[in-house]
Image (spheres, helix red, strand yellow):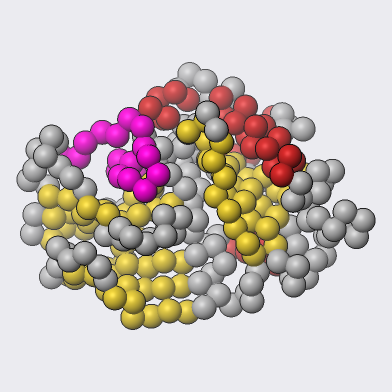
Amino acid sequence: MVPEVYDAKEGSFAGVYTNRLSQVFNDTVVVTTQARCTTRAFAFNIKSNIADCKPTDLMAGADSHDSWAVIGLGKGQIILARHSLDGEIELRHHILGEQSGMTFLHIPSPFNNLLTSKVIQYPGRPTLESVLMLPSTTVTNLFRNNQSHKPPVLIYPHGGPHAAHSTHYDPYCAALLELGVAILLVNYTGSTGYGQGSIDSLVGHVGDIDVADVQLARDDLVERAVVDKDRIGLFGGSHGRTHALLRKVT
């Protein structure tokens, strides 16, 4: 019904990776799924065969690094939500079969320019991607080093290992940013949303490929000279905690 995607490109359908029940209207399934470092909403016809199945990105044309989720569907009408890294909320109404939707609710970020964010890609490593969040100079810089004038950073690999971070709001990150701590969310090889090839390549190599990717992300961040290189920590739960316990990021 849905084609397998081996190598997911930015801004394209990456396969179905979701823990939510898909929503159905007539012959159309609407699903929220991981697509590289974002979540996106796609619709596809459940009666089409694999060769003819062409999932439709319901937010085509929107910023490629925004994350969207379906929160309601009825009679061909869809409500989509964007909850960005800085807490900004947008709700859009979309009608199946139409090319664009209409924003009917927008709530600005409550954090007053809490952060700047950047999606980092790594040449030659298409299945490794990170989201860097830097605290604004206007936040309470409790941990800022007065000598370097650069924030400390926590590197945050996700659990799973077959899971992923996205550009969706995270309360843990918001709290740390409010204190002046930078965050690097790492989607290492094997993360969902990067195609089946990425997932398959980690099988049998857990603790090697994923750890090497996190180390590479750390080294790249140091070279960017935007954080205090002497105050780098590792934070995570589940499989991400395993990275922290291994203490291979130095």
Q: Looking at the image, which residue sits at the far right?
A: 147
Task: Describe residue 11's horizontal placement relative to residue 227 as left or right.
Answer: left
- Residue under the image location 41 percent in, 66 percent down: 82
Of residue 222 and residue 23, the one placed in the foreground of this image is 222
Q: Is residue 244 visible?
A: no
- Residue under the image location 41 percent in, 37 percent down: 194
5 in the magenta segment = yes
- Relative to 66, does residue 224 appear above or below in the rendering? above
Q: Looking at the image, which residue sits at the far top?
A: 204
Task: Describe residue 200's horizontal placement relative to residue 188 as left or right.
Answer: left
- Residue under the image location 27 percent in, 54 percent down: 57
- Relative to 119, does residue 7 appear above or below in the rendering? above
Relative image position of residue 37 (x, y in whole percent): 47, 48
- Residue under the image location 92 percent in, 56 percent down: 147
Q: Quadrant of residue 222?
A: top right
Q: Count all numbered tags in the image, as a single digit.
A: 0
Relative image position of residue 72 (x, y in whole percent): 27, 68
Relative image position of residue 210 (x, y in whole percent): 56, 29
Q: Is residue 163 visible?
A: yes
Dominant SS in magenta: loop
Task: For the N terminus, give its image quadrant.
Answer: top left
- Relative to 180, does residue 185 appear above or below in the rendering? above
Task: For the C terminus, give its image quadrant.
Answer: top right
Relative image position of residue 98 (x, y in whole percent): 17, 66
Of residue 180 and residue 244, the one placed in the foreground of this image is 180
Of residue 19 and residue 111, the one placed in the foreground of this image is 111
Q: Quadrant of residue 243?
A: top right
Q: Which span is picked out in magenta?
A: 1-17
Of residue 29 and residue 36, the one placed in the foreground of this image is 36
